[in-house]
Amino acid sequence: MNSTVQFASGEFVPLEMHKVRVVQKLNLLPVEERLQSIEGAGFNTFLLQNRDVFLDMLTDSGTNAMSDQQVAAMSVADDSYAGSESYNRLYEAIVDIFDTEYFLPVHQGRAAEHIISQVFVTKDGVVPMNFHFTTTKAHIELAGGSISELFTDEALKIKSSYPFKGNIDIDKLKAKIEKTGKDHIPYVRMEAGTNLIGGQPFSIANMREVREVCDTNGLMVVLDISLIAENIYFIRTREEEFKDADIKTIIRAMCDLADIIYFSGRKLSCTRGGGIATKSKELYLKMRDMVPLFEGFLTYGGMSVREIEAMAVGLRETLDMNMINQSPQFIKYLVDDLDAAGIPVVTPAGGLGCHLDAKEFLAHVPQLEYPAGALAAALFIVSGIRGMERGTISMDRDADGNDVPSEVELLRLALPRRVFTLSQIKYVADRVKWLYQNRALVGGLEFSEEPKVLRFFVGRLKPNSDWTQKLVAKFREDFPEGI
Ligand code: F0G
């Protein structure tokens, strides 16, 4: 199950347990053109054109490589609005893997969040959770509720060896229920592979405790399994009880503890789309009618039948440890390399990506000058690597129009599954190290166009001094012939 091998030199190196059979050409623009490109994008990596990007590490969402089996399955898709065989094959995979009798397909993860929030979140309802995800929070608030994050004290420590930073603090959960009153809590939400704190897992032991507290109080547990593959990997490698368990056993142990599970297929199954699953007919019926209203008929939910076929195969591939360990092991390789070079990076390595701590990396840039956004822009300029700001820009302003400093100020470098080779990862490490040595040259950003909701997607910024010119000049000095 471990595809990291020891070389004769003694070094441990992760191997790609697949071979490349279809490729996409990449461009690596000269540094001067990369500067123009990020200027054109309002210093927001979401607004870059992909043709200007060398390594797209913005996200793993919808950018994972499909397997030959998935592509083959797409060619036997059964095109029909209702009662498609493709849907039946997906449904069989869902029941087989998660043991949930009821399933609702949706067009992507946030559509599941929309339906769950609209159906269950009451006005002024509070949803306790390990940590929020941007779209989750937005949908709960749209439905009139709010979120309450009950992570443990270890969760936000950048340097840590704590294996389960995604755990909920059980004492905080009990206190929250006591204070809020269970009637104002629509459900408790757990997120596998907790995205915004660095792709960090929770343990099954912790989820069992959450379940117990919820049972005592008659509360539902909703589990976001978009990043379950990596959470499974970490349970298998870090939770003693499951060290020899097969993957299906681990999945069932997690999902059996939830009343409702939902996922983004853009992450979980290397496809697009998403779904909501439950063992409860009653819960299913409460949500069902939202699907034809917002997504599409119950046998496609806004997905193409080709994606549905690929999803069925992709979900089954999640059961293959050789497949799901590639991304965490490559992330570990990158994180350990940067950590050894003294670069502030979230440890222990999680799933999803490598997370640079911009607060520490750019300690001279005040938080309201958006260090994580500035780091994202600077890294793109010096390397053509596109990462994603996960800090204060990703928080919207409060009701009084004030910036809300984010608890963590991260630059996420996502590793889509089966996409990058080890030499590309070595290039990432090299350019991050160069930038760290030259970090004093990087300054802050300010907004020039700022949307009110989810401003990180399309907001435009500009540098608050001429630091970008200085950075390019230094790069040219160090790499006169290079790109
Ligand atoms: N839940 C989690 C844990 C996610 O990471 C995401 C998306 C969603 C829900 C929403 O799913 O995009 O299919 O609508 N995360 C992406 C990311 C966008 O880049 O981390 P979606």
Image (cartoon, rainbow, N blue to C red):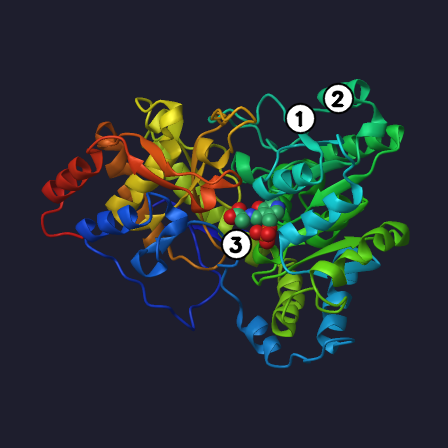
In the image, residue 296 sits, relative to residue 454, either above or below, namely below
Q: Amino acid at mark 2?
A: Lys
Q: Earlier in the sequence, mark 1 or mark 2?
A: 1
Element under label 3?
A: loop
Element under label 2?
A: helix
Task: Decide if residue 259 is on the left or right side of residue 9.
Answer: right
Which label sits on residue 61? 3
Question: x, y (%) of residue 113?
Answer: 68, 47
Which label sits on residue 252? none
Q: Are marks 1 and 2 in contact (CB under 8 Å)?
A: yes
User: How many numbered marks does the figure carry?
Assistant: 3
Task: Decide if residue 162 is on the left or right side of residue 142.
Answer: left
Q: Amino acid at mark 3?
A: Ser
The residue identified by callout 2 is 176
In the image, residue 137 sits, relative to residue 150, either above or below, namely below
Q: In this view of the protein, can residue 454 be seen by the observer?
A: yes
Which label sits on residue 150? 1
